[in-house]
Every structure is written in C-alpha cells, then in structure tokens.
Image (cartoon, rainbow, N blue to C red):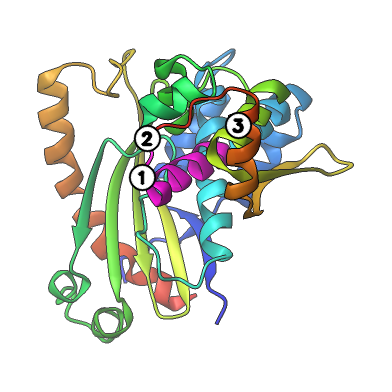
Amino acid sequence: VPIEVQLWAHPQCQTELDRLLQEPDAPAKSWINRTFAVLDDLIDRWSQSDGEMDMLADLRPQPLVRVNGLASALIPWPDTAEGRQFEVRCTHLELALLQVEQLRSAIAVVKFPAEIFVVWLRVEVTDAPREDGFLDDTDAAVARDALWLELGAVLDLTWLESE
Amino acid sequence: MKGKSPRRLNKVRAQLLADEATRAEYVNQRMISELGGIVARVLREQKLTQTSLARAVQMHQPDLNALLRGRAAHVPTLGTLRRLAQGLGVGLAIHIEPNGAVSIQPTEDSRKESEVLAHESGLDLAR
C-alpha cells in the first residue's frame, strides 16, 4: 500500500519562515531553501517505501537530536473526540532538530497507517554552529531540552485529522 | 481544536523556486542529500567503514563524511560519482528532467562486477 507523505508547517513556523524570507538580502533564504530540499528528499524517499522505515535514519544532514515517541503515551490530551481519534490512529512519532547552516528547525514525523505527516514545527536562526551543529556544549544541552518542549506543539497537531 | 490552521508549504516553495539561482541551489542540495543517503545505506548494508571507502574511492575522509551528512559544499564531480559507484558496487542512475530537476537512484546491485573492475583498476576495497 503506497504511503502518502505530506509536508506541513505549524502556523507559527510558517509565520517565521515568511518573516525571514522578507528580510532583504537575508542569507536565511538560502538556508530555508536548502532545508526544503532536505525535507523534500526525505519525503520522496518515504513515499516510495512501504512505510516500514527507520523514520529519521535517512535524514540528511543527520538530525542533531532525535526523540522517538510512543504515540499512544503522548496523546491522551486533549480529551476531546479529535484527541481520542488521534490517539487511536497515530502509530508512530519522531521529533528531531535539523540544522542547515545557521537555520535550526524542529521537525515532527507523525505516522498514521496510510499516511505520514512531516511537520515543520519551529525555525530559528542561530549563530554559526560547530561541526556537530551546535554552538557550544551549553547550546547542545539547551537544544536537547527544547526538543522535548516541542511535544506540546505535536499534541496540537490534532488539527491534521480535521483535513 | 486550538483554532489553528495547518499550512501546506507548496506556496512558499513555489515562490522560492521561481528564482533560477535559488532553484539551482535547491537541486544541488537535493542531489547531495540523495547521494548521501544512498552511500550511507550501502555502507551499512555492506558493513564498510567510511575510512575504507574513502581510501578506495580516493576521497579525503572528511569530504566523504560531509557527503554522508548532506553537508558537502559542492555536488560531486562525475569522476567522484564514478569512483563511488565502483567502490560501493552499485550503479548510480542520474536522471535530469528538461526543467532541470535532477534525481539520483541506485540501480541493481552489481557488486561482484564492480569488485572485479575495482581490482583491475587497483582500487582498495578492503573492509
């Protein structure tokens, strides 16, 4: 059964993307463009697969931090019909931080039986990172913690079910 | 519901790719990402190390690492692609659309034939 893979943006993320793209002569345009290329490649690859994949193993650049989520443990909230439907149908969830040059993105991969939503949750411009993608050791620790905070945004993704 | 609307990104992408230079950068990054994924997967499947592959294909190990991580500064040259295909034992099919879109895919496993070619050309495929 072919898997439909779709790229979405959290509304706040798209607002920030639009703002960055409107800055004159902004290098962020290149970073956003290349991030698009990375995500589109990932989506094409998954679309051609049978859906049985190590979700973020093929992400290039490799994610700075990744969290494998137990969807069933994440979705008892909100306690609404939509939330409960989300809980029942969502089979897998991964979160990752992705750094392309000085653009850091939080990405969620939300998997359902026949479709996968790749969601650009958050984007921010950082200083020039080290080879490992972090600014320094403190940044690395803060970034890891920040990823867990993205879970709140993922929980808001019950709106995906309404489409 | 939180009153938020999900957003598809097609419009943003279309605006970006309307610019020729930006489109070229996008195509290059996609090709680097695709190739990095192919090389990484074959390395895993064949239990090759980056060091041994770098030696076999005459690449600096940091350059190979950058390719594997999708961070290569440039699209590999045809000569580098040829050596990678030979060293990995996989064919690489590069498809270029009239609109400039490029895709790169591994073809059927030709490892045995490639090892012969590598041996004949003096490439070191020791693991």
Tag nearer the camera, 1 or 3:
3
Q: Is residue B37 above or below residue B58?
A: below
Instruction: Determine the main secondary structure of the stretch shown in magenta.
Output: helix
Q: Which residue is mark 2?
A: B127
The image shows residue A84 at horizontal and vertical percentages of 23, 84
User: Which image quadrant: the N terminus of chain A?
Assistant: bottom right
- Magenta-drawn segment: B33-48
Q: Nearer the viewer, residue B48 or A14?
A: B48
- Is A7 in the magenta? no
Q: Which residue is mark 3?
A: B118
Q: Which secondary structure lies at badge 3?
A: helix
Q: Residue at the location (62% across, 35% down)?
A: B86
Residues marked 1 and 3, same chain: yes
Q: Which amino acid type corresponds to the residue marked 2 in the rendered image? A: Arg
Q: Which secondary structure lies at badge 1?
A: loop
Whether residues under marks 2 and 1 lie with C-beta atoms below 8 angstroms apart, the answer is yes
Q: Residue at the location (18% across, 68% down)?
A: A70
